[in-house]
Image (cartoon, rainbow, N blue to C red):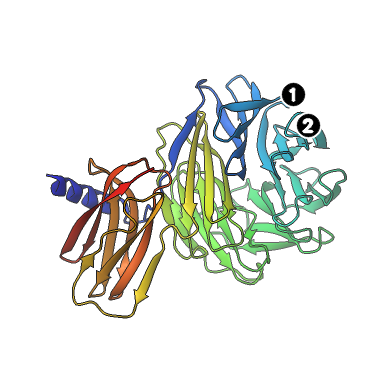
């Protein structure tokens, strides 16, 4: 009976994963009791400290801190509708509020000082340097006498250098990004369906000169994000959103971009693109789905998150801490989801060049374990290998391997950090071979 159940699960899951593999599971961590609360901003400090901004249906606003997984402490801010929040550490953070302000705290939210006031400021469109927490960029949303106002600071907002970028008619800011004190990018949304091109603006000298990068129109898209580059400003990704989302990559700082690659189609509305710690790990979040790449965007996997219509993702934060990646998601319904992954969470290692004579699936070691165990398996012929973990009821909880492998002997790891103690099963399928073994998580 259990084998039949496992088989039906595997077949059903395989159908769902034709376009994207789903490796990682987000878990629900907290739900605000007031159903009208929407999470608007998230920022991870470390494994025990999280900044949060919320707004309810009548615009009551809160700035919250969650410390060591305990109940939330309230920061007395007086800020109207705080939205995006970017933390430097547990004491210092910036907030962009609805309409026109950027605020800063240096004492864990006990007091907030206004750092920028512009009635046309686009509150989501400010960002902080990956290499220098005193360097920020902010932008107004729409045109003012033919240009958009961009603000750059190198001293944490004590002083701002206002710069005017001439935009085409019927255009507005769509996104901003920054890596260091010299490199800034501004994405553009054209509100006229007859726009001649897609574009973004950029500077490599702290805004002394702004240049434009244009792209040919594709699939009726008229928007181009601000690119996200690694810290060396060489490799970057950029998306053109619309009903069809296209991805571009660059290996030379944006001088040249790849041929556009269709990523996904549908009414998803993107939230953010993240590169964590200049690694090959990228996350791309939409309001309905989150995707992850472990090889600089060459391949992507869909991460599993249990959203119930009509809820959607409003805020996302990722951070590398030690040997793990941490992520948090906030929804319009006041839910918080979290994830914690090893740096190489779906690592598959060929441990020897020996060609085995037959398939085999070894007992995991250590066993029992907490939180990580290794699983070795042998593949005598090239072909697709699928290795999954199931709970005692036969529900798949983790897909460890699902790809074509050459003949060889391999190891992969299973991280049970977010898995409760209990008995679990792991099953390998390849060609006509199928085998299941039992393992125990003991915490």
Real-space Cα separation, disc 2 to disc 1, in angstroms:
9 Å
Decide: is 313 above or below 201: above
Decide: is 101 above or below 299: above
Answer with the quarter of the image where residue 42 lies: top right
Q: Which of 33 and 344 is in front in this view?
A: 344
Q: Nearer the viewer, residue 208 or 160?
A: 160
Q: Nearer the viewer, residue 59 or 170?
A: 59
Asked if the residues shown at circle 2 and circle 1 are in contact, with their CB atoms under 8 angstroms apart, the answer is yes
Decide: is 100 above or below 430: above
Answer with the quarter of the image where residue 348 lies: bottom left
The reply to whether residue 222 is in sight is no
Q: Mark 2 points at which residue?
A: 112
Secondary structure of residue under mark 2: loop
Rendered location of residue 177, percent (x, y): 68, 53
Decide: is 105 above or below 233: above
Horizontal relation, residue 7 to residue 307: left or right: left
Q: Mark on residue 15?
A: none
Q: Nearer the viewer, residue 19 or 330?
A: 330
Residue at x 39%, y 69% (from the top left corner): 349
Secondary structure of residue under mark 1: loop
Q: Which residue lies furthest to the bottom in this view?
A: 354
Tell me the quarter of the image containing the N terminus: top left
Rendered location of residue 179, percent (x, y): 70, 58
The reply to whether residue 28 is in sight is yes
Q: Name the residue under label 1.
A: 78
Rendered location of residue 52, percent (x, y): 62, 34
Residue at x 30%, y 75% (from the top left corner): 406
Residue at x 73%, y 26% (from the top left corner): 77
Residue at x 17%, y 45% (from the top left corner): 5
């Amino acid at each position: 009976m259990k084998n039949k159940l496992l088989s039906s699960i595997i077949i059903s899951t395989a159908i769902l994963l034709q376009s994207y593999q789903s490796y990682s599971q987000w878990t629900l961590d907290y739900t605000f009791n007031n159903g009208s609360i929407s999470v608007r901003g998230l920022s991870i400090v470390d494994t025990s400290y999280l900044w949060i901004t919320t707004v309810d249906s009548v615009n009551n606003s809160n700035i919250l801190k969650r410390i060591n997984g305990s109940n939330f402490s309230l920061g007395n801010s007086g800020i109207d509708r705080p939205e995006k929040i970017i933390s430097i550490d547990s004491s210092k953070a910036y907030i962009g509020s609805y309409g026109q302000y950027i605020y800063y705290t240096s004492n864990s939210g006990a007091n907030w000082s206004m750092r920028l006031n512009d009635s046309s400021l686009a509150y989501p469109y400010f960002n902080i340097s990956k290499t220098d927490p005193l360097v920020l960029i902010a932008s107004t949303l729409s045109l003012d006498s033919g240009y958009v106002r961009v603000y750059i600071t190198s001293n944490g907002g004590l002083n701002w250098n206002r710069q005017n970028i001439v935009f085409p008619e019927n255009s507005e800011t769509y996104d901003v990004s920054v890596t260091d004190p010299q490199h800034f990018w501004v994405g553009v949304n054209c509100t006229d369906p007859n726009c001649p091109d897609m574009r973004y603006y950029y500077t490599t000298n702290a805004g002394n000169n702004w240049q434009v990068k244009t792209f040919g129109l594709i699939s009726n898209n008229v928007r181009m994000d601000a690119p996200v580059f690694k810290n060396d400003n060489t490799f970057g990704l950029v998306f053109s959103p619309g009903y069809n989302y296209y991805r571009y990559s660059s290996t030379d700082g944006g001088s040249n971009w790849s041929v556009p690659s269709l990523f996904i189609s549908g009414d998803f509305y993107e939230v953010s693109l993240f590169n964590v710690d200049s690694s090959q790990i990228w996350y791309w979040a939409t309001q309905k789905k989150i995707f992850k790449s472990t090889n600089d965007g060459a391949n992507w996997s869909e991460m599993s998150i249990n959203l119930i219509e009509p809820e959607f993702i409003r805020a996302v934060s990722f951070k590398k801490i030690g040997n793990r990646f941490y992520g948090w998601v906030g929804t319009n319904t006041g839910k918080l989801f979290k994830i914690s992954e090893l740096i190489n969470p779906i690592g598959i290692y060929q441990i020897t060049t020996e060609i085995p004579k037959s398939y085999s699936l070894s007992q995991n070691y250590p066993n029992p374990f907490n939180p990580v165990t290794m699983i070795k398996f042998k593949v005598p012929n090239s072909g697709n290998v699928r290795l999954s973990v199931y709970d005692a009821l036969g529900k798949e909880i983790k897909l460890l391997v699902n790809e074509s492998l050459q003949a060889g002997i391999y190891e992969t790891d299973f991280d049970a950090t977010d898995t409760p103690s209990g008995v679990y099963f792991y099953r390998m399928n390849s060609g006509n071979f199928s085998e299941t073994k039992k393992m125990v998580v003991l915490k």
